[in-house]
Amino acid sequence: MTMTPHEVQAYVLTYLEALDCQIMERSPAHVTVKLSPEADKALTNRPYYWGFVERTGAPAETMSFTFIFDPDSYQQAIEAAEAKAAQASPLAGTNPDGTNGVTNGSPQGEPPKETILGRYFGITPSLPQLGPGRILREEVVYGSRRLQQIFGAAREGGAFVNLFEQAAKRQLRATAPAVYEPWLGVCFKVEFACDLKREELHFLGISLRSGEIIEKFGTKLNRRDLSPRLAENMHVQTAKVSLFDAGAALESHLTNRLLELDYSWAEKAQERLDLELDVLDTYYEAVLREDMPEVESPGNITSDTENVPSNRTPPVPLKKVVDITNAKPIGADVELAAEAAVPIDSETDAEEEKAKQAAIDREAMKLQYETRRTEMIWQYEPKVKVTAISSGMFHLR
């Protein structure tokens, strides 16, 4: 899923206008806006400043931004404006007063005087503009950090709304108050996911008086003038259906609608999953069958190393030398036996280390196999996920 620059601009402008931001300049490629206090709190991450304003009652100064939706078109427009301004400016030459470009004793084209910073650091850039008049410039394209922040702020601020239908002017002068009927509206996002993905939005509404359920509830709301303010000479009816029961009824209705759909795509996805798992199992089965010693515990390491074929002669048993009774002082035979035991121990340690490393490699391969299998199931297994992304109470006539 992606969004064109035009779609991004339409979404951002809708969000800014909903929060009563002041649009100062607008073009197909950008918009310059002064944020409202609510938008500034949501987008600028200045909790200490707003805490100071709320504690002291000082007048708030919100920030201004230039949001660029099409960087290439915006840059071309800037270059065209600069070229047009350069052509409109007077050319350097003889002045009308006959001074031949000399002003206050200095030629008109004389370069500015050398400064100390310029001498040591080259051309010094101008300082950034600070204060309330500063306008920050930022690119807002699909995938940018700022657009993701606006998405999050819109989800958080619009997760639940409470709106009232505005009455006609003649109703304000009527003797009897008009009656509002409460409706619960929930927008569900349904995801059909496997190695492919498809999403649907279902906006359902249920009357808290009669329990009537309406599909495409947004179409009914589009024809009405809604406001968070309760109009004059209007009366809100008491709900007969609780919010819990209304939400359960909407979930049951949506579940029944989903059961009527065609799920042949899920069967094909399951077939692709079985095929991928067969290939994965065959590969790792062959890898795990390689000549690796089976080591289950440290006690088995010695038995595995004893079975390793060797062409060398059996070692001289040291036990007999140690158990000799009435032994004379250690002689040449005992020294030769001890010398023969040293290479035997080093070779045994090497075999044990080799067996331990083989066991570690085998466990790592098993872990890799289990991870790959889990990832494959997560990617290919067909599933339907339903999420309530927004909801609200709508009081309609």
Image (cartoon, rainbow, N blue to C red):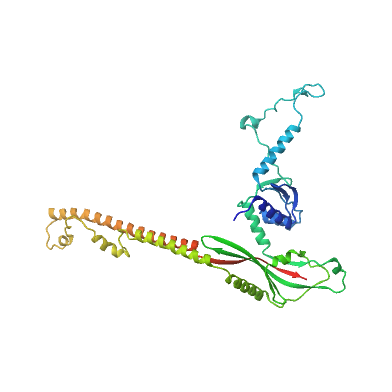
Could you say where residue 74 lies in the image, as x and y percent from the top left?
68, 43
Residue 291 lies in quadrant: bottom left
Left or right, 196 with respect to 110, comes to left
- The answer to whether residue 153 is above or below residue 89 is below
Quarter location, residue 279: bottom left
Above or below — where is 260 with respect to 286? below
Quarter holding the C terminus? bottom right
Across and down, in percent, residue 153 comes to 66, 58
Q: Report the residue that reaches farthest toward the bottom.
A: 240
Q: For the image shown, how many numbered marks are present on the structure?
A: 0
Q: Residue 83's spot in the image, x, y percent?
A: 71, 35
- The residue under the point 27% across, 55% down is 350
The reply, left or right, for residue 159 in relation to residue 318 is right
Question: Does the rendering let one see residue 363?
Answer: no
User: Residue 382, image x and y in percent?
Assistant: 51, 65
State left or right for residue 350 relative to residue 107: left
Query: Between residues 302 and 72, which one lies in front from this camera angle?
Result: 72
Q: In front: 173, or 66?
A: 173
Rendered-image quadrant of the N terminus: bottom right
Tell me if I can see residue 343 in this picture. yes
Q: Which residue is pictured at 66% across the width and 55% down the height?
A: 150
Query: Which residue is painted at 76% across and 32% down in the image?
Result: 89
Vertical position of residue 88 compared to residue 246: above or below: above
